[in-house]
Amino acid sequence: MFLKHIALVVPVLLFLLLQYSSAKVTYNVLSFGAKANGRSDSKNAFLKAWNLACASTSPAIIYVPAGRYLIASAVTFAGQACKSKAITFKIYGTLVAPSSYNAIGNSEVWIKFHRVNHVTISGGTLDARGAPLWACKSSGKRCPKGATSLGFYHSQNIVISKLRSLNSQMFHILLYACNNAKIQGVSIVAPGLSPNTDGIHLTSSTGVTVLNSKIATGDDCISMGPGNSNIWIEKVACGPGHGISIGSLGWDLQEAGVQNVTVKSTTFIGTQNGVRIKTWARRSNGFVKNVVFQHSTMVNVQNPIIIDANYCPNKKNCPNHVLGVKISNVVYEDVHGTSATQVAVKFDCSKGKPCSGIRLKDVNLKYRSRPAMSSCSHVAGVVSGLRGFTSCL
Ligand SMILES: *[C@@H]1O[C@H](CO)[C@@H](O)[C@H](O)[C@H]1NC(C)=O
């Protein structure tokens, strides 16, 4: 009898203990004074919810109901002292920036996470209202540089899921020195002529996955700066935009390289570039190696495949050092579709450090229904299975 009870009670207690220790606490921003009217600054309410979530010893949810929440100045969610094992922002609403661009335009980032671990952003919209700043920039007046909409710095185990980012002043999403991040199902929207509105920018990060996302913007859909490794990008649609780019690299002499990057099952529609590697012609010990571009569809893309080791967007005081960034082991496989220009594949590599180990496999690119052309400078590699395209390799 006694034994029988023990046998029953112990599992029940264990069950309750497990339930309790993994119980989630929820902090609704409305409970801390946030207003869903788009006009009252809700920044402090979000910070209060964050501080409680961060201090909680159980996993926490910060709940943002539907509605528009003004975040009137740059905000930092700091994670260094957090006790919680995981914090999820469950967002049904929209975070909006002030209409005057000066309010966030001199900050590096509008919504910043610093030294956080196990943070998830699920759903929601960020509306940075970048248009007036772009207009200022194109008028030639003095304007602020603009803020990145969402930035994670020195953080680990990040998930950004089903977030929508509209009209960022500068980059939409930035990961800087992050480790293990997953970005999935995001939608990024800004006009094709909005300046420097890169969709997702990665610097010095490792173990980053970008999946099932749609990016329409004015600069690179995804750009990867120095120091990135183990990057996986799959099922991303880009356009308008400047393509998916590694770079720009080679600005500094001492620069961390980029390695182990896979970009697969991507679609580019009307973009300036498809898959691109861009490096300055400056003396640098930076490098790019072990990159795979696979299964890409190009629709009317100006430069479907391009390595530009003489990157110099303003065409002013362009450097021309022959010992730039070393580029090696880059595979282009099953890249097909249409080019908007006759030269669909351009390899313009560094003279002193030629591109090596470049492989073109099953590349089929057409220009006006005829085989497109390629141009090669300081590049070595192999080709196979080419149709509808003439290779200079
Ligand atoms: C390359 O990156 C992938 C993730 O994208 C990872 O699974 C793999 O282990 C990495 N390979 C090497 C050799 O580091």
Image (tube, rainbow, N blue to C red):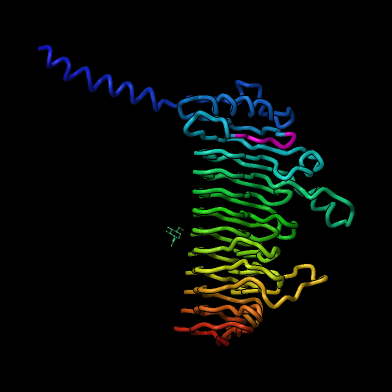
Q: Is residue 324 above or below residue 12?
A: below
Outermost residue on the top side: it is 2
The quadrant of the picture occupied by the N terminus is top left
Outermost residue on the right side: it is 141
Residue 117: image location, x then y, percent: 52, 39
Q: Observer-nearest residue: 254 or 287?
A: 254
Q: Is residue 73 magenta?
A: yes
Residue 49: image location, x then y, percent: 59, 26
Q: Quadrant of residue 312?
A: bottom right
The quadrant of the picture occupied by the C terminus is bottom right
Q: Observer-nearest residue: 231 or 216?
A: 231
Q: Observer-nearest residue: 180 or 321?
A: 321
- Residue at image x 64%, y 37%? 94
- Residue at image x 75%, y 76%? 320
Q: Answer yes or no: is residue 18 visible.
A: yes
20 left or right of 32 in image: left
The magenta-colored residue range is 72-78
Q: Is residue 63 above or below residue 339?
A: above
- Residue at image x 61%, y 39%? 113
Residue 79: image location, x then y, percent: 58, 34
Q: Is residue 125 magenta?
A: no
298 left or right of 86 in image: right
Ligand 1 occupies quarter: bottom left
Residue 46: image location, x then y, percent: 63, 29
